[in-house]
Amino acid sequence: MAAVVAAIAAGTAVRGCYNLQLKHCSAWPGKPLSLTSPGACHTPAMRLRVLHETHYDYEPAVQASRHLAHLHPRTTPTQTVLAHALTIDPLPSALEEDTDAWGNGCTRFSLEAAHHSLSVIARSRVETFEPPTPGLTMAWEVAREHLHQSEPHPHTTSVAALVMASPYVPRQQAFADYAAERFEPGRDLAEAARHLAHRIHRDFEYCTLSTDVSTPALHALGLRRGVCQDFAHVMLACLRSLGLAARYVSGYLLTHPAPGQPRLVGGDASHAWVSVYLPDAAGDVGARALNTASGHWWDLDPTNDRPAGADYVTLAIGRDYGDVSPLGGVIQGGGHRHLRVAVTVEPDDLP
């Protein structure tokens, strides 16, 4: 079949996660979290290459289908997209590039002829930088009050939406109760969020067969196990149930083969983590005065108990998994379908 290759915008997340214990230059639980020395990490930029292959087989044939793909890495303050190409086979009848409400590129395409298979392959090259360690933020309840009381303005309009419940992330007292141990009155927001990620990592078992893509966050909280998607949804629900803003991040993490073992093509997986909004403290530091015109996001990975670093590749952001699913849509016909996904993340040696 003919294929189309285009440099188009999208972003993705696939169920299946990196569950690693990798050393990182940011603070670990058991050590004081530095909130006064932003930029303490000086890791050089990394260049990474990502191959993300998705294949569907249908029996009987699908007569027609429409799809929405998110498979293009985002450009962020710590990430630059050097190249991206998407290959779709069979040739789409129509293809449109778009941008969603969260600024993620997306690709809409349709196939009007009968087909027994669908192949979507994304190839990306990115340059990443180590994010700075957060400096002084503010007490978490001060940040919460600001989010509830401040007048809407361009910087916080989208932030306010990320305090609310979403389809995969409810706001319920059970989540606030679980987080309360780490959110004592007066505790610094960044420090509290970091320790919440550590507690989820400590309390939850990483288990690929315990949940699926439709598992509610409250059920995962009760199970105390799941995969990266569940860890992220539980942490989001905790933060939002406390009135704080947080978003779901999908992407990849560079893995390292065991000593003497080759890197396996297709042996990696997509990953998911959390980004918490940290309003900037200004003026009287003792009073935690708030500069309402500024703030930034800090990415934390509860699955691996660490802040995201230069070895993370950000694909898409949203309220939850539903906003950034890799390949969705509707099909006409096709009784049985078989999905195969292969991901490879490796250092990019090209100039």
Image (cartoon, rainbow, N blue to C red):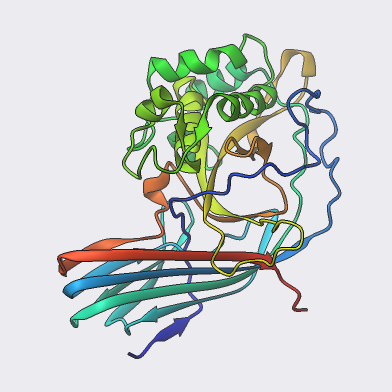
Q: Is residue 301 above or below residue 218?
A: below
Residue drawn at (69%, 67%) of the image: 262
Count of all numbered marks drawn on residues in the image: 0
Residue that lies at the very extreme toward the top in this rendered image: 185
Residue 240 in the image, given as x and y percentages of width and height: 47, 26
Residue in the image at 46% along x and 83% along y: 5
Q: Residue at the location (31% across, 81% down)? A: 92
Could you say where residue 299 lies in the image, as x and y percent from the top left? Answer: 63, 41
Question: Residue 231, how many percent across, how many down?
Answer: 50, 35
In the picture shown, does residue 312 fall above or below 186? below
Q: Is residue 30 left or right of residue 215?
A: right
Classify the position of the N terminus by image quarter.
Answer: bottom left
Query: What residue is rendered at 78% in x and 79% in y?
Result: 351
Q: Quadrant of residue 241?
A: top left
Residue extending farthest to the front is 260
Which of the 4 image quarters holds residue 44? bottom right
**235 and 155: which one is in front?**
235
Relative image position of residue 331 (x, y in whole percent): 19, 66
318 over 119 or under it: above or below = above
